[in-house]
Amino acid sequence: MMMAQLQQEDKLNLAPKKFNMWIFIFTSFMFFAALTSGFIVYSGGSGKGIKIILPSAFMYSTAVIILSSVTFLIASRAAKQLQFAKQRMFLWITAFLGILFFCIQVYAWKILIDMGVYFINPNASQSFIYVFTSMHLLHILAGLGLLFNALSGSYKNIPQVKNLFRMEFAGIFWHFVDIIWIYLYVFLLLNQY
Amino acid sequence: MSTLAVHDHGVESHDHDHEHHHDTFISKYIFSMDHKMIAKQFLITGITMAVIAMVLSILFRIQLAYPEKTFPLLETLLGHFAPGGRLAPEFYLSLVTIHGTIMVFFVLTAGLSGTFSNLLIPLQVGARDMASPFLNMLSYWFFFLASVIMLSSFMVQKGPASAGWTIYPPLSALPKAMPGSGEGMTLWLISMVLFVASSLMGGINYVSTVLNMRTKGMDLWKMPLTIWAFFLTAILGVLAFPVLVAGVVLLIFDRSFGTSFYLSEIVVQGQVMPYEGGSPILFQHLFWFLGHPEVYIVIMPALGISSEIISTNSRKPIFGYHAMVYSLIGISVLSFIVWGHHMFVTGMNPFLGGVFMITTLIIAVPSAVKTFNYLATLWRGNIRFTPAMLFAIGLVSFFISGGLTGLFLGNAALDINLHDTYFVVAHFHLVMGSAAIFGMLAGVYHWFPKMFGRLMDEKLGYLHFWLTFIGAYLVFFPMHFMGLDGVPRRYYAFTEFPSMARWLSVNVFITWAAILSALAQVAFLFNFIYSIFWGKKTTQNPWNSNTLEWTAPIEHIHGNWPGEIPTVYRWPYDYSKPGAAEDFIPQTVPHSQTMSSNLVHDFEDNEAGLAAFHEWVKANPPREEVK
């Protein structure tokens, strides 16, 4: 009986778990802060900048990821209003936009390569573009994982309290990944010449 | 909030996993999600790694004492790493590197924080377990994997990483730079990435648990100083380790993909390498932005542990509780703005050097506050010299004698002379090496009954303490003088340099002192293992301590307390309170039960309590004092 009660407590122990995600966000933020600081130290010390105009593909990907945050908001509102079909549909759209973002970023690499801006480059400022985007894409992959986690929960009809928890858990991260990209993009824009 | 939720979609029972709670061997001892078991796993892995790192140090100490002699046994043991019975120079560098890496990260970060944060955070704040027990389990297994991979680099033909524990490029970035830069370095990087992942998972859990899962009545200012220390340590880790990951990611790109973040024009073995324009200093910035907070990650848990032990065993409240907390916070904040003092001689702008010098020297203030508070707690205390207490006092001693030399090293001008000499080695081995190890050992002796339900042998504990304490000073104190004379660290043999050859006799002395201290650890290991199985059974609260963990039953149960979690009514340092029946009042005793010892300030936010107290004082006028 005791055990059952304890496990009950464990199960509903969701607030601290959500808090874990917030702390992880700080961790992740420090990671990108370190990379961008590294860029500043490097380019300030060597006098080499990015020295190109960034491909416009990045603009489209930015639009796509902002849109995906909006669709996620719609999905989570639907989840709160118990409209589970709508929740699933907008989660699918969000995930699709995430994948589209991924593809556009990879396409942008191709454009960069066509421009002669390689990853392996004596001007590491240009290599940094690849580092920022690829490290961010790793976060996108993690975010997609969380989205699919929320989706599968929704299909499996898990209890609503857990459904909302998975949505919030994914949401915190997804919006964060969105904001981090905007930060990186603005950072790159400010340093492109 | 969550209790209001109704399971409105999905009718099926959500509690299908209630029945299989019979622990199997695997779920209890291996993939355990119980914080107490994970703490023991961290401790035993940490001790194992510490023994290995200690053996490595004895190996290179033998080389330093007897650089010309051959020991055929070494060749038998180490094979081609010690051709002809003398350590190969490259292997000497590997030993130094791996000794440093294991001690700093695997023993004093994971072994120390991993053990005591896991054990004490839920028990002392009054929680059933960590915020995420699963993440906690993963944290241990990542650490275990990292340990195995780090050690496996000894199996590689060319030997383990040998660029120093700071792995500065280009040595770490060019696989051909030296034997240890090859596969050994790759394994080092893989191991450290896993280690950082482990550390982050642990740290995230610690922060979240402290902030969200404290029991009723346990506000932040009622937390024991151990919890404050673990909490701030975890925050440092969460903010600093990602920066190391960023640095290592760029390093891996340089090593394996051919980018030029850290590498500029360089010629290796007569071959011009294709790199251009990179900045090795960039790596140092990224590394030390982690590296400096890291030394506080190492020392702060030890400081927290000794606060608790010194107060308990002096039978006195800790002196300056708030000052202790604010100093920890001060140290934590300052630790992020001092990293440049590791880089004074990299050609840093002298003005910037001055800024880093000032921030560095300011750290002396909170550190001194802590030191004086320890001493003031001891002052006229009713001291019980348990082994744990001795080790805690030993920590204070090392923290003072090692901390003083920090003032010299933090000075940008003096550092030009002292940089990379044995003075630095002496400094950090005392202030963070020995001090933190003593804090960890103090913790082991003090909380052993909580972990294993048995007591460690006191006599062996005293033997262990005195031999280690004296041994550590004999090892590290002479190094100051070598450093002042300009003897550089990490050199393989000083006989090649006439100006340093005269230090050979000192090196022989240090080596024998090191062997003595190493042998002293046998007393500990025997005591530790023997007591786990055959030690004297403990009582529930063997040290008459106030904190919550001693209200939990000796027998470990999942969820820590049978029935409800105890409520907390007072701070954890009510020792020898005048008027109290005993010399300790646990946190779970309400003030209404201790009227004779209450003071007005015990009722700061409690007007009803204060009124009741005044009434009680009126009814029970103080008796004539008997002199």
Image (cartoon, coloured by chain):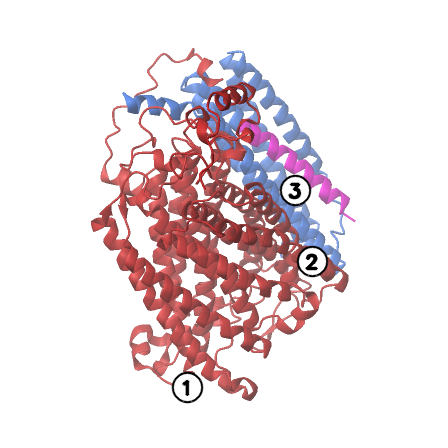
Tag shown at residue B68: 1
* Pointer 2 local density, CA inside 10 Å: few below 14, some 14–19, many at least 20: many
Stretch in magenta: A170-193
Which residue position holds label 3?
A108
Seen from the viewer's position, the closer of residues B339 and A141 is B339
Whether marks 2 and 3 lie on the same chain = no
Chain A colour? Answer: blue
Q: Quadrant of residue B250?
A: bottom right
- Do callouts 1 and 2 mark residues in contact (Cβ within 8 Å)? no
* Pointer 1 local density, CA inside 10 Å: few below 14, some 14–19, many at least 20: few
**Subunit of label 1:** B
Foreground: disc 2 or disc 3: 2
- Do callouts 2 and 3 mark residues in contact (Cβ within 8 Å)? no
Q: CA distance from mark 2 to mark 3?
A: 41 Å
Left or right of A41, for residue A169: left
Q: Position of residue B370 (x, y in %)?
A: 56, 51
Q: Quadrant of residue A2?
A: top left
Whether marks 1 and 3 lie on the same chain = no
| Chain rendered red | B
Which residue position holds label 2?
B356
Left or right of B371, for residue A152: left
Q: CA distance from mark 1 to mark 2?
A: 42 Å
Query: Looking at numbered disc 2 in the image, what kind of residue is underneath it?
Result: Phe
Above or below, B231 relative to B43: above
